[in-house]
Image (spheres, grey):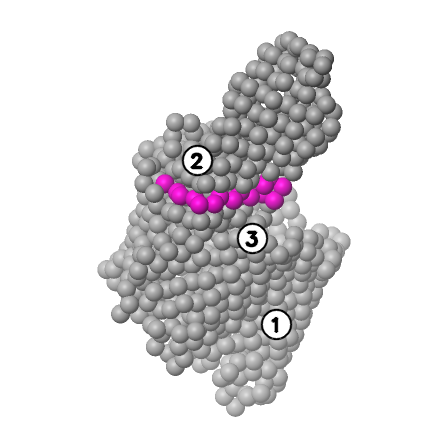
Amino acid sequence: MNKPCPALLLALLALGYRAPVAAADISLSCAARPVEDRAFTTGGIIEINADSSQADIGAQRITFAGNVELLQGNRRLTADEISYNKDDDVVDASGNILFSQPGIILGGDRAHAELGSRQLNISPVRFELPAIGGRGTAAEGTSTGNELFRAEQIEFTTCPQGDDAWLLKAGELQVDRAAGFAKARNATLSLGRVPVLASPWLQFPVGDRRLSGFLVPRASYSSRDGLDLALPYYLNLAPNYDATLFPRIISERGAMLGAEFRYLFPGTHRGTLYGEALPNDRLYEGDNSFRGAFRVDHRSRFSERFRGLLRYTALSDDNYLEDLGRDLGITSTRYLENVFELRYFGDTWEALANWTQQEVLGDFDRPISRFPQLLYRLDQPLPANSRLLFDAEYANFERNPGTSGPRLDLYSALEGEWRKPWGYLRPRVGGRFTQYRLDTPIEEGPENPERTLYSLSLDSGLYFDRNARLLATEGVQTLEPRVFYLYVPYRDQDDQPNYDSTLPDLSYPNLFRQNRFTGADRVGDANQLTLGLTTRFIEAPSVRERLSASIGQVLFFEDRRVQLLPDAPPETDSTSPLVGELDLTLSQNWSTTAVLHWDIDDSRMDDGLLRVGYDNRSERELVYLAYRYNRRHDLKYTDLAFDWPLTSQIRFVGRWQYSLSTDRTMEALGGLEYDSCCWRLRGAVRRYIATTEGDYDNSLFIQLELKGLGRLGDNIDELLRRSIYGYDPFEN
């Protein structure tokens, strides 16, 4: 088995690292001398101010002494003494020289300037780049009117005076503010006094322009994949589109290449195309060692009301996202949804044309495509505090294997609402018609099954409030009882396919649904009454909600005969689980969330969540502890995460997710961050379940950032954001 070679990373870095603005994370907090960064002007009028002057008539020379200031456009030169030759338009300056123009500040003991060509020579020279808070010294420096600065034998850093935590030494430095970058030749980078990188050529940004060049190298290590190294290269192709190449080497798998193309047409179109390929994956045990992926994400705005969307992903195999898909921007590794839609918004209506393909990766491979889908929605206000609701959908479903065919679904309802400050009453009467044309009948049923039914509902609520006190805080407490009645007659639906109906998650708002199923394939029969109660505490005078607590339950007057699967037995429970939800802000920083689903008949908990968190943004302190239980899925785990400063410069981050059901750690993450004025170091180790079979992967991530110059290492920020809720990068 091949082992990772650390020398590979060092060799690639030694080729010459460039940090374009597109990837730079620049902090100005340690800027040595920030100045107003104005546009460069070349006005020819010269103004000189000084305490005294002496003129040499014969040579047309004037010598100025004492607090001398020379101004030309927005170029400024100060010195103890300046000698100006009017015939040659030449200036010689000495003593405490300070020269500034947009983008750079120069200081020294002697200077020679040709005002006509706007060229200035200072030796020796001290220079500052205010845009990145950088400073340095050189044996000699030259500034010209085209905003160019060139220096020889330089030392450069973004650290404050007296702190050379990192130092860049180079034989030559060329700063071009108009282009937005600086070039160093024969450069050596030292941390402290230890040289860590030598490069014949190095480039870094000094402005906010996008530059072509290498982005932040990414490197990580895992026990499964070995060393994972990527060296992205950014291409600034045009103001409205760019591209990035992603050469990537995974020591245990092989070499791969990715490419991303981004485009933006303001107000009309924007999108991203991304593709990557690994010609020969040495770890993959599938039929073909070639692995690759392609993804497109496009959005169009044809007008204020007319929008378009295209989102499509193609993979070489079902395990690709799990093994290699970190750059595809897909959160789930087991599920894909490809979508193309056109949507038009009217004042009270909406029309949609859509193609959707849903695919579950892995052992269950039964993709469902929906093409076309035509949808029309209307919400039309009517007199007497009423409104007309109308939904019309035509969709053709294709499923292989399985029953396929088009579906027509029509729903209309008339809803009234009478609202007062103390309560409301909302009746609704609706009707639904659904028809199918199937290529294969279900259980010898009809080829064109159809369903017609009606529904009646009445939603009502009251509002009570009083002055109250919560945790020594004055405010208003509300009491909001709610009663919801729903009647839907039974219709046998076993001869209908089920394309898109599922059971939604049980929650307090879902107790008041018009249909206990999602989608249109199943409409649940109902004769039920939902009782709910909500109380809130509103803090005065901030009007901030400190407490929200709800409890509710459904009372069933008849068995529920309609089920997702044909011939499934009816549900005979007379009540639903008791659902309780709580959100409580204990103080400015402390909060808690609780969810409880309690089965009254069996006296046991079906589902539960308890989370307590402390979030002090001003001090960058974050910690939360959660417990989750779900009886149906045999899920029981604890989750501890934190982001805590140990000192003003060091913070400790971590997460531990432990399954009580399997007695295994699901994820363990720990890391340290050190942040100084001019550099930042992050390191993290992670152990997590990486495959559906339950195999662990152990990973190591290290990132070094030299502020104003660039970063080396993997993007740990993204890892911490995904793992730790509320995490923010540590910024000074």
Q: In the displayed structure, does residue 473 sit left or right of residue 492?
A: left
Q: Which residue is mark 2?
A: 155
Q: Looking at the image, is mark 3 or mark 2 earlier in the sequence? A: 2
Residue 27 can be seen in this image:
no
CB within 8 Å, label 2 to label 1: no
Q: Secondary structure at mark 2?
A: strand
CB within 8 Å, label 3 to label 2: no
Which residue is at a point 36% across and 32% down the rendered structure image?
648
Q: Percent from the top left, x then y, of residue 703?
A: 38, 48
Rounded to the nearest angstrom, the CA distance separating label 3 from label 1 is 37 Å
Give the label, 3 or 2, closer to the camera. Answer: 2
Which residue is at a point 45% across and 51% down the rendered structure image?
16
Label annotation for residue 212: 3
Which residue is at a point 55% across and 40% down the rendered structure image?
175
| Pick the front one: 624 or 234 | 234
Rounded to the nearest angstrom, the CA distance separating label 3 from label 2 is 25 Å
Judge whether 189 appears above or below 275 on screen.
above
Which residue is at a point 58% across and 21% down the rendered structure image?
93
| Pick the front one: 251 or 112 | 112
Q: Looking at the image, is mark 2 or mark 1 earlier in the sequence? A: 2
Give the label, 2 or 1, closer to the camera. Answer: 2
Q: Secondary structure at mark 1?
A: strand
Judge whether 223 appears above or below 669 on screen.
below
Q: Secondary structure at mark 3?
A: loop
Q: Which residue is mark 1?
A: 355
Q: Which residues are magenta?
A: 176-190
- Dot 2 alpha-carbon crowd within 10 angstroms: few under 14, some 14 to 19, many 20 or more: many
**In the rendered structure, does residue 187 fall within the stretch colored magenta?**
yes
Q: Amino acid at mark 3?
A: Ser
